[in-house]
Image: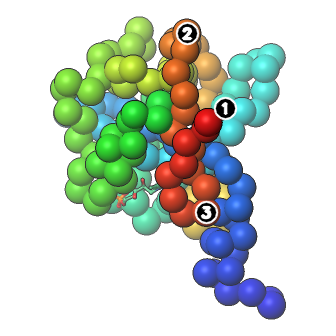
Amino acid sequence: MSFDGRDLRNALGRFTTGVCLITAVDERQQALAMTANSFTSVSLDPPLVLWSLQNNSDVYHVFARPRYFAINVLAREQQEHSARYARKGQHELDPAHFRSGRYGAPLIRNALASFECELESTHPGGDHLIIVGRVRDMHQRPSGKPLVFYSGGYRELH
Ligand SMILES: Cc1cc2nc3c(=O)[nH]c(=O)nc-3n(C[C@H](O)[C@H](O)[C@H](O)COP(=O)(O)O)c2cc1C
């Protein structure tokens, strides 16, 4: 291999993404969120999406197999949400930041879009677990700009 992990991370960072909060409730009904940019659309019919979860996450047991979860696309004014829920031990959702969706997964207030998903399948993906969800319901804001992640930093669309 002619590259190391840092080279790979840098090159992958050249792919511009949005930023999401993945949300679910744990076995105590505590609402949790994790910042993620691995969200990808998979299929329109059936409506499938995916994200990938690092195997060594402290909250792997919650996010690896929830019956329902939500993918919330953050708006540019929600950068603080992204930073907060990316911190170790900081995944418990502030009650002011969400409401419960039809299937019980937390929906982030003022997100650009939220996809309420039922777990469809999981697939080993090296040091991550690929999680495929079937979209059961969705919500979107009529306007607003996205939070953008590029080359390891937050950006804005102009
Ligand atoms: C912009 C951004 C994108 C991220 N994307 C992912 C992701 O797709 N999957 C993932 O497992 N962690 C991702 N993370 C890391 C988690 O948000 C978080 O830092 C990590 O889960 C903290 O460790 P813990 O899970 O052990 O608490 C991302 C972090 C940031 C800041």
The residue under label 3 is: 151
Residue 110 on image: x %, y %: 39, 20
- Amino acid type for the residue under numbered disc 1: Val
**Whole-number angstrom distance, CA of label 2 to CA of label 3:** 28 Å
* Location of mark 2 (residue): 142
Taking 21 as reference, is 3 left or right?
right
Q: Quadrant of ligand 1?
A: bottom left
Residue depicted at x 54% and y 63%: 152
* x and y, in percent, of residue 50 in the image: 64, 38
108 vs 142, left or right, is left
Residue tagged 1:
49
Judged from this view, the residue extending furthest toward the front is: 158
Q: Going from the N terminus, do you reach mark 3 or mark 1 first?
A: 1
The front one of 75 and 115 is 75
**Which structural element holds mark 1?**
strand
Q: Nearer the viewer, mark 3 or mark 1?
A: 3
Q: CA distance from mark 2 to mark 1?
A: 21 Å
Q: Residue at x 80, y 90 (%)?
A: 2
At 41% across and 9% down in the image, what residue appears? 102
